[in-house]
């Protein structure tokens, strides 16, 4: 089974983050693939952690709280945590439409080179 992690750094985006994760969880994933979500919290002072607990029962979400260090450092921390074959970077305010994750995975199935990137 191949894996794809959606990496989302966030800072004080609790309300829209939950909508973004819900949109990701509704995605169709090609056969032979497993989807995970890695949320890096960049020291949020809103209720991000509390909001995520309502979704935490979904095994596909990994929550990485941390001190405020900036979006790039938070994204890199998430990347180090992931063991997935493919990574999809999204912002906390991105609401993907149905098919977005499938197309990303299909691109990587067609271009398995380690340096291949879909934009």
Image (cartoon, rainbow, N blue to C red):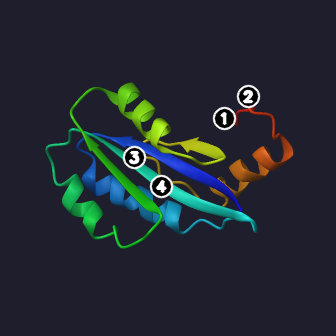
Looking at the image, which residue is at 81% across and 49% down?
109
Task: Say which label, 2 or 4, has the lower sequence index.
Answer: 4
Residue receiving disc 3: 93
Helix, strand or loop status at disc 1: loop
Q: Residues within 10 Å of mark 3 (few under 14, many from 20)?
A: some
Residue at 36% across, 73% down: 57
Does residue 98 show up? Answer: no
Pick whichever of labels 1 and 4 is earlier in the sequence: 4
Residue that badge 4 annotates: 37
Residue 42 higher or lower than 15, as above or below: above
Q: Which residue is mark 2?
A: 115
| CB atoms of marks 1 and 4 within 8 Å | no
Residue 50 image position (x, y, % from top left)? 19, 61
Give the Cα separation between the discs numbered 1 and 4. Answer: 19 Å
Label 3 element class = loop
Q: Is residue 80 left or right of residue 102?
A: left
**Which image quadrant: the N terminus?**
bottom right
Q: In terms of sequence position, does the residue under pointer 2 or pointer 3 come before the other?
A: 3
Label 3 and label 4: CA atoms lie apart by: 14 Å
Please say if the residues under marks 2 and 4 sit with CB atoms less than 8 Å apart. Answer: no
Residue topped by disc 1: 119
Task: Give the mark toward the camera: 1 or 2.
Answer: 2
The residue sitting at 65% across, 68% down in the picture is: 28
Q: Earlier in the sequence, mark 3 or mark 4?
A: 4
Tag in front: 1 or 4: 4
10 Å crowding of disc 1: few (<14), some (14-19), many (20+): few
């Amino acid at each position: 089974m191949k894996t794809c992690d959606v990496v989302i750094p966030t800072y004080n985006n609790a309300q829209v983050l939950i909508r973004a994760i819900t949109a990701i969880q509704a995605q169709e994933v090609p056969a032979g693939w497993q989807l995970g979500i890695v949320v890096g919290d960049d020291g949020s002072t809103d209720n991000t952690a509390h909001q995520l607990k309502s979704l935490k029962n979904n095994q596909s979400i990994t929550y990485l709280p941390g001190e405020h260090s900036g979006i790039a450092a938070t994204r890199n921390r998430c990347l180090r945590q992931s063991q997935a074959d493919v990574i999809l970077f999204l912002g906390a305010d991105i609401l993907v439409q149905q098919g977005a994750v499938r197309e990303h995975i299909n691109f990587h199935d067609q271009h398995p080179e380690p340096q291949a990137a879909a934009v």
